[in-house]
Image (cartoon, grey):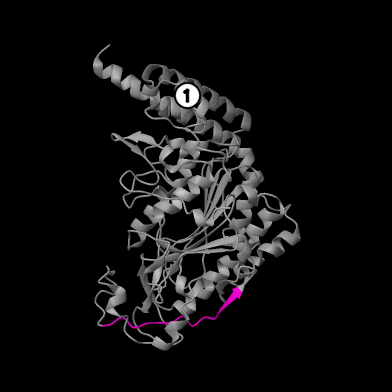
Amino acid sequence: MSHIQETTDHLLSRRSFFGRTLWGVGTGALASMMPSRLLGSPLSASFAPRAKRVIYLFMSGAPSQIDLFDHKPKMQDLFDKDLPDSVRQGQRLTTMTSGQSRFPIAPSMYQFARHGQSGTEVSELLPHTAGMVDDIAVVRTVHTDAINHDPAITMIQTGTQLPGKPSLGAWLSYGLGSENNNLPTYVVLNSTWTAKRDAQALYSRLWGSGFLPSKHQGVRLRSQGNPVLYLANPEGVTQETRKTMLDGLSEMNRKQFELSNDPEINTRIAQYEMAFRMQTSVPELTDMSNEPDHIYDMYGPDAKIPGTFASNCLLARRLVERDVRSIQVFHRGWDQHGNLTRDLPLQCKDIDQGATALIQDLKQRGLLDDTLVVWGGEFGRTIYCQGKLERTDYGRDHHPRCFTMWMAGGGIKGGVTYGTTDDFSYNIAENPVHIRDLNATILHCMGFEHNHLTYKFQGLNQKLTGTDAEANVIKGILA
């Protein structure tokens, strides 16, 4: 055997080991029995997880923290005053406002109040969220490196601004595998929105597997027609015929694998078999006719409209009940450069009751303790106005320096407000949280020390939290 062939077989067998097992890094005992040359580096869960699964509620377009969670009452006296240079400090601007002759301060027109035993401040735009503040940890000091939407969403999803890396859900699938053999490990739900503007595109690579085996990529369920394309049998093809065809195809693929040792062939076999099982499991999952009226009342009237955020939150709870590992619910339309006071209330109405109902529904079923829920967008909005400024009409540009997210459930302490920003919600005053820290915290709740969840690629031990910077768990929000 040539050196090249020997090396190729070694690499393929290593990839095959991880591609064929559902453990990936999830079993330290197995890892300890395997030779280090095969594993590359020790890969194992670090400690007992607090959460078994994650629901990520992603607000694409960047919600305005100033109008929702980060109350800045002192700004009322500075209406239409220029943002001081001492605050901006020459920081990067987008091309949408870099040409403005001035940066007039736009105070939020919305009222804030303290809620719950924790006294967490929340805007009047989120009355349902305000009622559950004792169940969530509000993090006001998240920051990111990117200033435009696609690289910022790519970064929060994959840990880097450059496309092509695995998403969080793919990492969790690789690391922990599946607890349900009849549904995908990672499911994506895209929601409709009511803001009166176009929304940023969401590309399938945002829930892709990157360099990980392709079986770890997310599967998007559609709200119209068949939930998954080509899942139903073609007209005239019975279930028995379909099974016979798949058995024959699997046998041919297995013979091809014996010749080439390509692990992606085994992935293909597994995907065909999963698709066959999903022909039964997916229709059962998406048939919500057996949900009682009091549940629909909890989620609100939109819950009966397929594809809405509320409906997707209810579907997310059903996925949790079926032990799906990672669920991501996208909601677009949060990019209010102008007409914020028209569009932001519409967006909040879309998500407020559904997100709150999801937390309470999980809680009453005993599922919140081991389900981590994350809410937030890719960056925040500026205190200064983009374009024309009025007391009750303003817009805000992108702001990566500080923004707000919240977390709840497995491993998270409720009733916490973490981090403070300056009076302008422009710079972080205390306890900064980088995107890397956020992802490290999510992995921590799932039982991983983030440096231990790695995959050898391009000569590096690749990680969700990156290979060239530090990441720290947000200990102040842990239960």
- Residue 390 visible, this orientation: no
Q: Quadrant of the N terminus?
A: top left
Q: Is residue 105 magenta?
A: yes
User: Is-magenta flag for residue 324?
Assistant: no
Q: At which x and y percent is residue 369?
A: 64, 50
- The kind of secondary structure element at disc 1 is helix
- Per the image, the residue denoted by label 1 is 32
- The secondary structure that most of the magenta stretch takes on is loop
Would residue 291 appear left or right of 461 to someone viewing this image? right
Above or below — where is 155 with respect to 70? above
Relative image position of residue 251 (x, y in whole percent): 50, 20
Give above or below for 91 relative to 241: below
Q: Residue at x 27, y 69 (%)?
A: 91
Which residue corresponds to the image point at 32% horizontal and 35% vertical from the top-left? 457
Q: Is residue 72 above or below residue 319?
A: below
- Tally the numbered discs: 1
Magenta span covers which residues? Answer: 102-114
Task: Give 94 or 234, whichever is nearer the viewer.
Answer: 94
Q: Residue at x 42, y 46 (%)?
A: 167
Q: Position of residue 415 (x, y in %)?
A: 60, 63
What amino acid does circle 1 point to?
Ser
Disc 1 crowd rating (10 Å Cα; few below 14, some 14-19, many 20+) is few
Q: Nearer the viewer, residue 44 or 162?
A: 44
What residue occupies the far top of the structure in this picture? 1
> In this orientation, does residue 382 appear?
yes
